[in-house]
Amino acid sequence: MEGNQPEMAAIEREIAEAHGDFETATFGMGCFWGPEARFGSLPGVLRTRVGYAGGTTLNPVYRQMGDHSETLQIDFDPAVLPYEEILRHFWGNHYPNRDEYKGRQYISLLRFHSVRQQETIIRIKEEMENRLGEKIETEIAPYQDFTLAEERHQKYYLKRYPRILDQLAQHYPDAESFQDSIFAARLNGFAKGFGNREKLKEEIMGWNISEESRRVLVETLMAIKW
């Protein structure tokens, strides 16, 4: 960054602080690349990461995940995006009763992090069953653990644009800062076709951060060449 402009790491912290307390949601709905892009595009989602959950196999990796399933984990601001809406997006964007394919790798899976989340799941599940016209077979259980997937799977669709990654490298010098970035989550959604540049610009201008931070984000967004 030039001059006295805030660094992207400071801006990301400012965004997180502006949202205050966050909650975590963990779920699987097939291959994890698409869901990360879809949910990463939603206002209220602060961080996205993909990995493996739901099984007992120790130290799962992509080629040897054992009885785990491909899973998405998000941190979100419930004041902006209530858990109820996350569940409606979840069940509204995949068929939960598909027979197991490749074992458990792509099953429909929900792991709740609190009693309140469990109660919400029960209520929204009934609502979505009425809409679907059949019983939902999503595997639902308390959250136990989540193993982060390999770096190549994080923000998968954004990584299909090497030129953009080069542009972002100066702002996110390591894998962890890139993975935890709300800005990268939005761009990953954009890369998959969720939202557009103007919609993201409008969201940025509505964030409760400094005017200078908003300016830096918008300038970075507009400078990206797809």
Image (cartoon, rainbow, N blue to C red):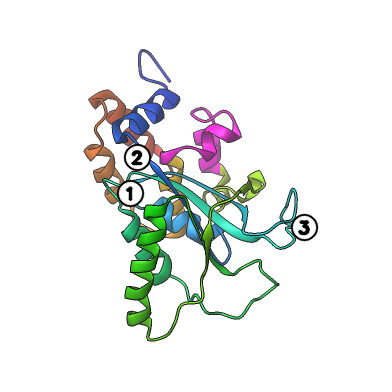
Find the distance from the CA under tag 1 to the CA under tag 2.
8 Å
Q: Residue 140: where, in percent of width, then height?
A: 51, 65
Q: Residue 78: where, in percent of width, then height?
A: 31, 47
Q: Earlier in the sequence, mark 2 or mark 3?
A: 3
Q: Earlier in the sequence, mark 1 or mark 2?
A: 1
The residue positioned farthest toward the front in the image shown: 115
Residue type at tag 1: Arg
| Front residue of 160 and 98 | 98
Please give the range of residues in magenta: 163-182
SS for dot 3: loop
Find the distance from the CA under tag 1 to the CA under tag 3.
38 Å
Question: Label 2 crowding class (10 Å Cα cut-off): few <14, some 14-19, many 20+?
Answer: few
Q: Residue 11: where, in percent of width, then height?
A: 37, 27
Q: Earlier in the sequence, mark 1 or mark 3?
A: 3
Residue type at tag 3: Gln
Pointer 1 residue: 197
Question: Label 1 crowding class (10 Å Cα cut-off): few <14, some 14-19, many 20+?
Answer: some
Task: Name the quadrant containing residue 128.
Answer: bottom left
Q: Residue 49: where, in percent of width, then height?
A: 53, 47
Q: Which disc, if any, is residue 222?
A: 2
Identified at 30% across, 51% down, the residue is 81
Give the label, 2 or 3, closer to the camera: 3
Query: CB atoms at circles 1 and 2 under 8 Å apart?
Result: yes
Residue type at tag 2: Met
The quarter in which the N terminus is drawn is top left
* Magenta span includes 88: no
Q: Confirm whether residue 177 shows in the render.
A: yes
Give the label, 1 or 3, closer to the camera: 3
